[in-house]
């Protein structure tokens, strides 16, 4: 047995809650997380039609405070953090000097311009914090409080109604509200990763199980979270983004603000923009029966044009959907090789499906 194999997986404070609700678990970036409770399709449809609840406590929370907080975040992030005021949120990327994506994040402004909450991906949490410390400056206090907080996401057309039964006030879309649950401080974020309306609530570990019970929604695992986010056209870090790819290639140029001043990776991204993209993320819909998966070949005629970064059978569209990077300028015909069979596919615009988000 190797040293690595003896490392025990991490558990969120809701681990026993998941077991009590019949969860099946998988390893996700070193975390033992629920992949499903009943079935992925049933949980997917619950979110599309009513509402479901996800445990996303494995994600990280970094607080940025001090008089130089805004300047620090402006240099760190590709998006313009100065555009958000108290209670507002913005999606952004953190890039390396070559423009490669270190992570995609949400920045919540708690008190302009000196107090922010940055929510980062689970698999990159430690790496992100080290990068933040490396690029910090005087007048900034960084606190990685990921071990102190848990997070649940209530998503679906009736998710906000469910949240309204627990909290007196619910923020508008892409806003955050500091409030209290069971005498403990918490943050209600009107954001999500499913294409539906909903909230993501960050609360102390000690009260997260009571909060999950209070929502009284269908428990949903990572399986449904993946099919939902793919239908919505949301990218997954580690699959669809990494440090070898840029936000421009990933199809999110709107999250890169070249006119805000200097930021890490700006020069490389500007050169790529001016020189023209060589490859780009492209969405595909299968025209015949098949289920595309990560790593499957994307064919253009008889040639391999790229590999699928994310793919699944869409419970909503009842067909296979996928995304992957291919050279700019290819016009097809396209196919995706599914288990040795070339399944015809057509390119399409993201999202594959638009839900109830506002």
Image (cartoon, rainbow, N blue to C red):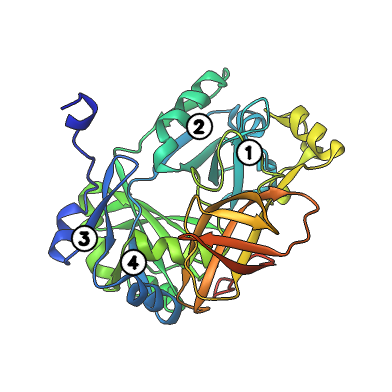
Q: Which residue is mark 4?
A: 53
177 left or right of 211 in image: right
Q: Position of residue 321 (x, y in %)?
A: 55, 67
Q: Which residue is mark 3?
A: 24
Viewer-nearest of labels 4 and 3?
A: 3
Looking at the rendering, in which quadrant would you find the N terminus? top left
- Asked if 107 appears above or below 47 in the picture, the reply is above
Q: Give neighbour class at mark 1: few <14, some 14-19, many 20+ (Cα, 10 Å).
A: many
In the current view of this chain or complex, which residue is farthest to the right?
Answer: 274
Q: Nearer the viewer, residue 48 or 202?
A: 48
Cα separation, mark 2 vs mark 3, equals 39 Å
Q: Look at the numbered disc 2 and give the secondary structure of its residue.
A: strand
> Do labels 4 and 1 touch, CB within 8 Å?
no
Q: Position of residue 317 (x, y in %)?
A: 53, 78
Q: Give neighbour class at mark 2: few <14, some 14-19, many 20+ (Cα, 10 Å).
A: many
- Asked if 51 appears above or below 15 in the picture, the reply is below
Q: Nearer the viewer, residue 72 or 356?
A: 356
Viewer-nearest of labels 4 and 2?
A: 4
Q: Give neighbour class at mark 4: few <14, some 14-19, many 20+ (Cα, 10 Å).
A: many
Q: Look at the numbered disc 1 and give the secondary structure of its residue.
A: loop
Q: Quadrant of residue 2?
A: top left
Q: Nearer the viewer, residue 219 or 143?
A: 219
Cα separation, mark 4 vs mark 1, equals 32 Å
Q: Earlier in the sequence, mark 1 or mark 2?
A: 2
Q: Which residue is mark 2?
A: 65
Q: Look at the numbered disc 3 and give the secondary structure of its residue.
A: strand
């Amino acid at each position: 047995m190797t040293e690595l194999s003896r490392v025990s997986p991490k558990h969120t404070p809701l681990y026993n809650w998941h077991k009590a609700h019949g969860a099946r678990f998988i390893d996700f970036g070193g975390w033992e997380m629920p992949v499903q409770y009943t079935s992925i399709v049933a949980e997917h449809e619950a979110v599309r039609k009513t509402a479901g609840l996800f445990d996303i406590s494995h994600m990280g929370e970094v607080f940025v405070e001090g008089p130089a907080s805004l300047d620090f975040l402006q240099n760190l992030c590709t998006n313009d953090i100065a555009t958000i005021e108290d209670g507002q949120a913005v999606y952004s990327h953190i890039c390396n000097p070559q423009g490669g994506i270190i992570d995609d994040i949400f920045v919540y402004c708690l008190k302009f311009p000196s107090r922010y909450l940055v929510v980062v991906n689970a698999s990159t949490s430690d790496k992100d914090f080290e990068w933040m410390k490396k690029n910090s400056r005087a007048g900034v206090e960084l606190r990685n409080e990921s071990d102190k907080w848990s997070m649940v996401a209530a998503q679906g057309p009736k998710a906000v109604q469910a949240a309204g039964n627990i909290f007196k006030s619910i923020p508008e879309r892409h806003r955050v509200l500091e409030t209290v649950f069971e005498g403990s401080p918490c943050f209600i974020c009107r954001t999500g990763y499913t294409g539906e309306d909903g909230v993501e609530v960050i609360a102390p570990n000690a009260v997260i199980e009571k909060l999950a019970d209070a929502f009284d929604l269908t428990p949903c695992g990572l399986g449904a979270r993946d099919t939902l986010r793919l239908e919505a056209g949301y990218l997954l870090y580690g699959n669809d983004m990494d440090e070898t790819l840029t936000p421009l290639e990933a199809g999110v140029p709107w999250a890169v603000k070249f006119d805000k001043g200097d930021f890490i990776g700006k020069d490389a991204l500007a050169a790529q923009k001016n020189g023209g993209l060589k490859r780009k993320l492209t969405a595909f819909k299968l025209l015949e029966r098949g289920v595309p998966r990560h790593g499957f070949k994307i064919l253009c005629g008889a040639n391999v044009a790229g590999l699928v970064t994310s793919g699944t059978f869409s419970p909503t569209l009842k067909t296979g959907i996928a995304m992957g990077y291919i050279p700019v300028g290819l016009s097809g015909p396209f196919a995706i090789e599914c288990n040795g069979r070339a399944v015809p596919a057509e390119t399409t615009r993201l999202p594959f499906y638009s839900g109830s988000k506002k």
